[in-house]
Image (cartoon, rainbow, N blue to C red):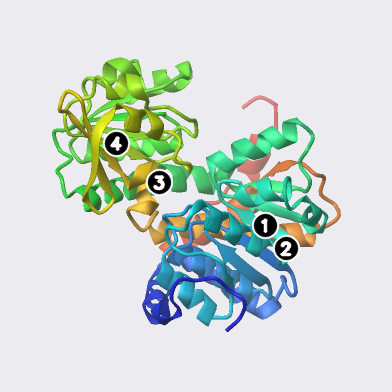
Amino acid sequence: MMNCAIRNPDLAPQGRMKIDWVRAHMPVLGAIRAEFERSRPLAGVKVAVSVHLEAKTAYLAEVLKAGGAIVTVTGCNPLSTQDDVAAALVEAGIAVFAWHDPTPDEYRTHLIQTLENGPGIVIDDGGDLVHLLHTDLAHLAPGVIGGCEETTTGVIRLRALAREGRLAFPMFAINDAHTKYLFDNRYGTGESVWSGIMRTTNLLVAGKTVVVFGYGWCGRGIAMRARGLGAKVIVCEVDPVRAIEAHMDGYRVMHSLEAARLGNVFISATGCRDVIHAGHFQVMPDQALLANAGHFNVEISGPDLERLAVSRRTVRPNIEEFQLADGRRLYLLARGRLVNLAAGDGHPAEIMDMSFALQALTALYVVRHAGELEKKLYPVPPEIDRRVAELKLGALGVKLDRLTPEQEEYLAGWGPA
């Protein structure tokens, strides 16, 4: 067996079934794979991938390998790695350093092992690989020709590096592409968060009051799906424009300390820390559910919850009960980590088909433009965004109208109608 660190290689057949299932529902990535197999445009390029290690990520890794890349994969969250999928990837000849629920030291070691391959391209989700390449493994940064960042949290970290003039290689903000945030963040997060909550709790959503912290694209999706399931939805925001948008979308908007008294389910989706804290816990109703949809487990203040609790126990898989001094019970889902991945399978395959197609095509763009790119954060080139949309529409059997030459001339002109 190749150099790797996985929990149990005997799980590979089970993981292969998962990968084959999503592959059948990811036609955009499948079309790119067919192109990659013919032209091998990534031949010899070392790629380090740190994305939630489940079946859809595994298929992305296999597509990159089909293009000739030498791929090394790890997770980007301790609870989202699926051991059977990791085993299947190793069996397919892809190096993996990850297992479910590692200790903090093990998690860090897996990241380091992934980068020790000396990647030319990094595909990150949350920014952990990039952080190491700017700190303890900075000596490997000169070998990186560029990379991609999948999610909002990671892009925030990249913007901070770029602002300080410290970004050591070019990076592309996959999260900011239209075919990512309009669909992955909104429809993917909306569906997968509620799937994770419902399968974990086995409780009804209809009739409950749901409080959504943050009305970015992820928050929009969570609120939209909650309303569709019959919940009453309250939105809490710090941005006045987003707050007005939530109001006009038909949700109640209020200060979070007011909302804390009313909610039955609280979901954070902000990318910030200590969003739900002691002040909220002290007034929440008995049996309130606490779930996080942000990348890191800092949005719901675990230290505050532990300090206020007089007892703590696991009542169901992925549900911890914290009993407060007055007898109220608060239920924390998935240890405050991403509920849709730590307690579920993540976004639907059809959604990640577009997001991972962006990753694959942007990685190819980096290779083709190696040496031309500056050390800064770039948007995804619009032609890639458009191509992914066109491939998706083609897979759906949808045909578009086309402008006539006269219409194009009219739209490009400035004269009278």
Place of residue 300 in the rendered image (x, y in percent of width and height, measured from the top left): 39, 33
In the displayed structure, does residue 280 sit left or right of residue 231? right
Query: Mark 4 belongs to which amino acid?
Result: Leu
Q: Are marks 3 and 2 in contact (CB under 8 Å)?
A: no
Query: Mark 1 belongs to which amino acid?
Result: Val
Q: Are marks 1 and 2 in contact (CB under 8 Å)?
A: yes
- For label 3, the residue is 338
**Mark with earlier residue (2, 4):** 2
Place of residue 339 in the rendered image (x, y in percent of width and height, measured from the top left): 35, 47
**Dot 4, how many residues are within 10 Å of its Cα: few (below 14), some (14-19), or many (20+)?**
many
Say which quarter of the image contains residue 294. top left
**Dot 1, how many residues are within 10 Å of its Cα: few (below 14), some (14-19), or many (20+)?**
many
Is residue 388 visible in the rendered image? The answer is no
Cα separation, mark 4 vs mark 1, equals: 33 Å
Cα separation, mark 1 vs mark 2, equals: 7 Å
Q: Foreground residue, 101 or 15? A: 101
- For label 1, the residue is 122
In the displayed structure, does residue 12 sit left or right of residue 1? left
